[in-house]
Structures are given as structure tokens and as C-alpha cells.
């Protein structure tokens, strides 16, 4: 986050969160998260290439037959099988044509040429329209993805690249021209990948099986990993999108299908795009130091944002981060229902608030921190527990966790409003939403946890809840996660 004066407005929560205490009925709120992922059941099993998967009948230039090439070749065969049915079904009988050629290479030594240039030292995967080819680096990129995130991350990257091939085949139907900004093309390709993964998760693939919990989490983690660096402008020629933007597009394809992907254009993408450069006055480049002053500013922002609920706001209490009388302890910060306090361990939160080391991350190493907004979002989640308890909403079940993530998203949008000169406060900075998503995707993050620390099984649901709160506001939080 960054410091600066800003005008305050109140989140509309009064009379809405109270509805969350009611049970669902015909015509009532839609129950989400408790057993389904965008209409599919929550499933737990090992995801990846099926033991009985057929051998792909594809020619791959320069392939070495190793495990990475096996994953990649099966991914291309599977994605092509999906589009051979989806393209004519979704786009008025449009006939599907496989890509012309496939190339596997090792970026540490190979120098093959494509119509888009040499692959020498190119740690990447790409679609090249010049020769209608898909290529991938089996030497560095694919092994790193598989090691860090699991086999479905390899499929994720190639499904995205094949999304560009679909753009090329659809032509005007996808609305892509030479002048279309790169980030719009990338959003569409992420969306097309999401529609493919819905097909896999529904059990229709011959090659892969994908659970909607751990398997889909691999996919979401890969989407997060390939985000742009914080501070990149959405107008940059090479912009691909923040993690927030990319997961939005992927989830749109997963839930709505390829027609919605093809409808993405410059106007509607830029209207919701979060990718932007750092503000001129943001001397910390998106990371404020977590100290007593910033904690007071976070508290003031939350109080102002949620005052419309008409309940007593919980107080921040520095200390061990545990409830003094026992109860639901979720370090580094806990909501204590007995005395309506948010207990926090400042030292542990300071560690979490350390800036993300994206260079270390790209090299396959763990970053020591997730960024300031990850820490602030965890505090906001425990504060939101107190507000929900105050209005009579549940705070100890999976939907309570999703509702909390949704409210954190609504609060994030609240902090993103224009400034008021001379008035101190915190404002959402470039990269902050990605820090919240990083917390949502880790197994012990608090942003989507209920009062006792239990989290919904699916990272897909956790990220979607934050996104809906940010883009749609607090009313959707109680309506969707009752």
C-alpha cells in the first residue's frame, strides 16, 4: 500500500451481512464454496497424466522423449481434442485445425529458429503465428514449473499458448487485430485456457485428470507465477497482466466458457484491469513498513469502511497474536469473540509484510515475505470476523471464510478511491491485490479462513471470493456466501 490523503466512503454492509445468518431457500442467496467449485463438486485426488492415457499421435521437432516432453505433448493433444469439439459447438460450426508444427527445445543449449526468432536462452513457451507453431522449453521452464507447482502447471502454460492459436483461428470473431494491446490478447488466452480446464475437471479428458481442490490449486498457482512484476503498466507492449487480472480471465473461461473469452476486448478489459504503474508519490514502490503508525491507519480505514454495519468495531491489541482467554487462535493474528478484539503479533506480521523477492521466486526460491498488503489483508480478515459476528452472521464454517475473503476484497476496493489532500491514510498500490492472492493460495493463509482458521478446500473459490468483493462490492459477499 502507499500513504496519501484520500476521501473516505462507506461500504454498504448494514442490513446485508445479517442475511448471511439465514438458510438458503428457493429464490434466496446462492450457497457457494460448501461442496462445489463453479458448479462442480470439490474433489481430492492426485492430478496429472492418466496412467492409461493414449500415446499422442503428434510429431514434435527436437523432442527428447523425457517426462517434460511427454507432459507437454499430451497437453497439446488434449487441448486440441477439446477445441476440436468446442470450436464448432461454440462458434457456429467453425472447423478446428490443429497447429502446423510443434517444437521442444532446451534453452541452455539449443538454437532452433522459428518464424518468431531463435530459441537460444529463451526460458519460455510460446505460440508463433508466423509458422502456426507451439514451442516450449523443456530444459528450464517445464522442469521448474513441474517441481514447484506439479504437473498441471505445465498443462496450464501450454493451454494458454494454445489459446493464442485459437485467437488466430477465430480471427475477427475474437476481435483481435494488429492494434489490439498485448494485455487484451493475453487475457483472452488465459480465458480460453480456463474453458479447457473446466472440460478436464468435468472428467472429459482422455489424457488428464484434475481435482477441483489440489489439482486446480496447481493451475491457479501457475497463473499466479506467470504474472507481471508489480508496477508494470497495462499499456506496456509486453504487459500480460497482474495475478489478479490473469486469474480473473482464467476463472471467467472456467465458469462461463469460450464465447465470453472471445467477447473480451480492449474496452471491457481495460475497464477492470488492475495493472498500473506505481503512483508518483509511492516512494516505497507498493510496500509500506508495518509499524504502529501503519497499523493505526489500517484500523482507521477499516473503521470507516465498515461503520455502516452499525456494530461495535473490534479493537487491535498487540501482543502474542493469541486470544488471552483461549479459543480460536490463528497466529499471527486472531479474532477473539469473547472480548471483540483482534489480537496481533506485530513481529510475525512484519515478517509477512516483507516485500516479495520476485527474482528469487523466478529462480525457484521462496520469498521471505508476501508484501505489506498480505499482512494488512490478514488483519482485515480478522476484523471482518468481528463485524460479521456483530450482525449475527456465521463465523465458523466454509462460507464464513469465503464471505470474509469477499469482504477483504470490498475493503481493498474502498482503499482504492481518490485522495483528499492533506488527509492521512493508506491507498491500494500496484501489486497489492496480488499479495492478497498469494495469501489465499498458501495453505496457512488467513484471508479466507473462518474464525478458527479453517479454510475452504479450493483455492479457486478463495480467489474468486476476493475478486467478487473487489469488483462487485460488499452486497455480493452475503448474497453469494450465505
Image: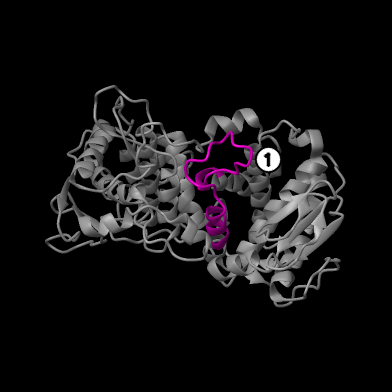
**Residue at (26%, 48%) from the top-left corner?**
290
Element carrying mark 1: helix
The residue range painted magenta reads 218-245
Q: In the picture provided, is 353 more to the left or to the right than 320?
A: right
**Point 31% across, 27% down: residue:** 6
Q: With respect to residue 418, does 395 lie above or below?
A: below
> Which residue lies at the image location 72% right of the left edge and 48% below the top edge?
163
Q: Which residue is mark 1?
A: 185
User: Residue 44's x, y, as percent?
Assistant: 53, 68
Crowdedness of circle 1 by 10 Å Cα count: few (<14), some, many (20+)?
Answer: many
Judge from the rendering whether residue 22 lies leftward or rightward of residue 46; answer left or right: left
Instruction: Tell whether 318 sits left or right of 415.
Output: left
Inspect this view and state whether residue 297 appears: yes
* SS majority, magenta: loop
Quarter-of-image position of residue 80: bottom right
Taking depth in this image into account, of 129 and 114 the one nearest to the observer is 114
Residue 42 pos. (x, y %)? 52, 61
Amino acid at each position: 500500500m502507499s500513504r496519501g490523503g484520500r476521501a473516505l466512503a462507506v461500504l454498504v454492509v448494514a442490513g446485508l451481512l445479517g442475511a448471511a445468518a439465514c438458510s438458503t431457500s428457493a429464490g434466496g442467496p446462492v450457497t457457494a464454496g460448501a461442496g462445489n467449485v463453479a458448479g462442480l463438486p470439490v474433489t481430492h485426488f492426485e492430478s496429472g497424466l492418466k496412467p492409461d492415457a493414449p500415446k499422442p499421435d503428434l510429431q514434435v521437432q527436437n523432442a527428447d522423449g523425457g517426462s517434460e516432453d511427454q507432459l507437454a505433448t499430451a497437453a497439446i493433444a488434449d487441448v486440441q481434442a477439446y477445441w476440436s469439439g468446442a470450436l464448432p459447438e461454440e462458434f457456429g460450426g467453425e472447423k478446428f485445425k490443429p497447429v502446423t508444427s510443434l517444437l521442444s527445445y532446451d534453452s541452455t543449449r539449443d538454437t532452433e529458429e522459428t518464424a518468431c526468432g531463435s530459441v537460444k536462452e529463451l526460458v519460455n513457451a510460446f505460440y508463433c503465428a508466423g509458422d502456426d507453431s507451439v514451442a516450449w522449453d523443456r530444459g528450464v521452464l517445464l522442469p521448474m514449473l513441474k517441481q514447484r507447482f506439479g504437473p498441471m502447471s505445465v498443462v496450464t502454460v501450454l493451454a494458454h499458448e494454445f489459446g493464442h492459436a485459437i485467437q488466430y483461428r477465430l480471427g475477427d470473431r475474437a476481435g483481435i487485430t494488429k492494434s489490439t494491446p498485448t494485455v487484451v490478447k493475453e487475457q483472452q488466452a488465459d480465458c480460453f485456457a480456463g474453458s479447457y480446464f473446466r472440460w478436464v475437471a468435468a472428467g472429459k479428458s482422455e489424457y488428464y485428470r484434475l481435482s477441483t481442490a489440489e489439482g486446480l490449486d496447481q493451475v491457479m498457482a501457475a497463473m499466479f507465477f506467470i504474472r507481471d512484476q508489480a508496477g508494470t503498466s497495462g499499456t506496456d507492449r509486453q504487459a500480460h497482466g497482474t495475478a489478479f487480472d490473469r486469474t480473473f480471465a482464467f476463472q471467467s473461461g472456467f465458469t462461463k466458457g469460450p464465447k465470453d473469452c472471445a467477447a473480451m476486448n480492449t474496452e471491457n478489459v481495460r475497464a477492470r484491469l488492475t495493472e498500473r504503474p506505481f503512483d508518483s508519490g509511492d516512494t516505497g514502490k507498493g510496500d509500506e513498513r508495518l509499524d504502529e503508525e501503519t497499523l493505526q491507519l489500517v484500523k482507521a480505514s477499516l473503521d470507516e469502511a465498515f461503520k455502516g454495519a452499525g456494530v461495535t468495531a473490534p479493537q487491535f491489541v498487540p501482543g502474542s497474536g493469541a486470544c488471552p482467554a483461549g479459543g480460536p487462535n490463528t497466529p499471527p493474528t486472531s479474532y477473539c469473540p469473547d472480548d471483540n478484539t483482534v489480537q496481533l503479533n506485530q513481529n510475525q506480521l512484519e515478517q509477512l509484510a516483507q516485500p516479495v523477492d520476485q527474482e528469487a521466486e523466478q529462480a525457484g526460491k521462496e520469498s521471505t515475505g508476501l508484501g505489506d498488503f498480505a499482512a494488512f489483508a490478514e488483519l482485515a480478515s480478522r476484523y471482518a470476523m468481528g463485524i460479521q459476528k456483530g450482525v449475527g452472521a456465521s463465523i465458523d464454517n466454509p462460507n464464513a471464510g469465503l464471505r470474509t475473503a469477499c469482504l477483504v476484497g470490498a475493503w481493498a476496493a474502498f482503499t482504492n478511491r481518490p485522495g483528499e489532500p492533506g488527509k492521512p491514510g493508506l491507498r491500494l498500490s500496484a501489486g497489492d491485490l496480488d499479495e492478497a492472492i498469494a495469501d489465499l493460495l498458501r495453505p496457512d493463509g488467513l484471508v479466507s479462513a473462518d474464525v478458527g482458521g479453517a479454510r475452504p478446500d479450493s483455492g479457486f473459490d478463495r480467489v474468486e471470493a476476493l475478486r467478487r468483493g473487489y469488483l462487485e462490492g460488499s452486497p455480493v459477499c452475503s448474497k453469494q456466501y450465505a
